[in-house]
Amino acid sequence: MEIAPLPLNEANRLKALDSYKILDTFPEQEFDDLTALAAYICGTPIALISLVDAHRQWFKSKVGLEATQTPRELAFCAHALRQPDEPLIVPNALEDERFATNPLVTSDPNIRFYAGAPLVTPQGYPLGTLCVIDHVPRKLEPKQVEALQALSRQVSAQLELRLNLFNVTRANKLLRASEENFRLLVEGVKDYAILMLACDGRVVSWNAGAENLLGYQANEIIGQHFSSFFTAEDIQQGKPELELRVAADKGRFEDESWRERQDGSRFWANVVVRPLYDQAGLIRGFVKVTRDLTERKQAEEEIRKALEKEKELNELKSRFVAMTSHEFRTPLSVISSSAGLLKDYSHKLDEAKKLKHLERVQCSVNYMTQLLEDVLLIERAEVGKLEFNPCLLDFVEFCRDLVEELQLGIQTNHTIALRTDCSTCLNTNAYMDEKLLRQIL
């Protein structure tokens, strides 16, 4: 087993990790949702948000694992810290000399497959990984690797949001001693819309991040009700009032939904509202933090659609393979039967019967060839390489020829009848792709 060497910036990395004040905290739904989504997308029984300190890796969120931490010298994630710009993927730990004798491989949880995407701060420090683990060797599809990396960025963003909320909460306490210090702190945040509300919902402060995100200048919005940022549907349902009521009752309100800018455009927002208290412990207003998560929302929607499309395509392929397998049995039986008769009783059959059996074999071969053409047609359609080559075609004559071919391939006690009414048709010619039309019919 190989112990991961320390990153070159280990001292600064540990300081950065400590600054987030997240080690040994309680589970949080925001992180658990991302961990569950990673396990679902990658199809693994285990998924973890692992943070690596000086002596251990600690799991902020976990799916499919009871342990809350492991020694750092055993951690796969410690190896991932050495390459923060790319995921660490171990298809089979037993075949990797770094991990083959690792107790996490040779005993519970019996790791075989591991993929970890580093969690990197804006300053470039890797704090840990979002990783997925399986008990059997496997590989991820490129789209799954991309999705895992996208989710790791969302975990990092959630860490940043959590840190900012932590700072806002700390500023709330400082407000009791100095509103000016609180104002300066909030004004310095550019990536989040942070505003203070009066108890009735009127805006009383407005930072640069709020101006960037929502479009209002401070003099345009201060004194107005914060329902200006809600959609008409949410206003009708009373959601602005609900936010303040829940924040006052529970001490915190958080939601993700659509919000509106001054120009009427919408964005997907993560919103957190906390009450502000005076020295007597009474609510004197609220602080509201809003972040634009439109890109994450779009990415999740694209992933969902891709998974649905892949599932639908797999079901279609399964049905087609089952149908094709069934369809192959009949011509194969005819070929086997006729070939057997020609082999064993050729000396007893007259020329007419021999010719009949040969025709049956030929028709069956033609039928199987057509089935294979159908398979290739679907494959070409899936990859977007289906060709369309129209030419002038007598449609009635084409149908008659097709019926004649089909008649040769069925039993003699069945007859295909073709009825045409061309009394009002001056011309039965049309430009069609004969090959595609044959396969469709």
Image: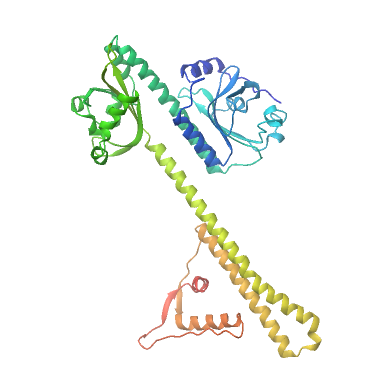
**Horizontal and vertical percent for residue 138?**
64, 41
Up/down of 78 relative to 256, above or below: above
In the image shown, does 375 or 252 lie closer to the viewer? 252
Image color mode: rainbow
**Image quadrant where residue 210 sits:** top left
Placement of 131 over or under 392, stated as above or below:
above
Q: Which of 339 and 146 is in front in this view?
A: 339
Give how far across and how far down residue 152 sits, in percent.
50, 32
Is any part of residue 323 visible from this angle? yes
Residue 374 location (% of width, % of height):
56, 67
The reply to whether residue 288 is visible in this rendering is: no
Please, which residue is most extreme toward the top here?
A: 177
Q: Point out the residue furthest to the front here.
A: 249
Q: Residue at 54% of width from left, 38% of height from top?
A: 39
Residue shown at 57%/64% (left/top)?
A: 376
Using the rendered view, name the quadrant where residue 52 is placed: top right
| Left or right placement of residue 160 versus residue 181 in this view | right
Location of the N terminus by quadrant is top right
Question: How many marks are shown on the rendered structure?
Answer: 0
Side of 177 relative to 104 (left or right) = left
Give the image location of residue 204, x and y in percent: 22, 22
Question: Looking at the image, which residue is at 39% across and 86% down?
Answer: 422
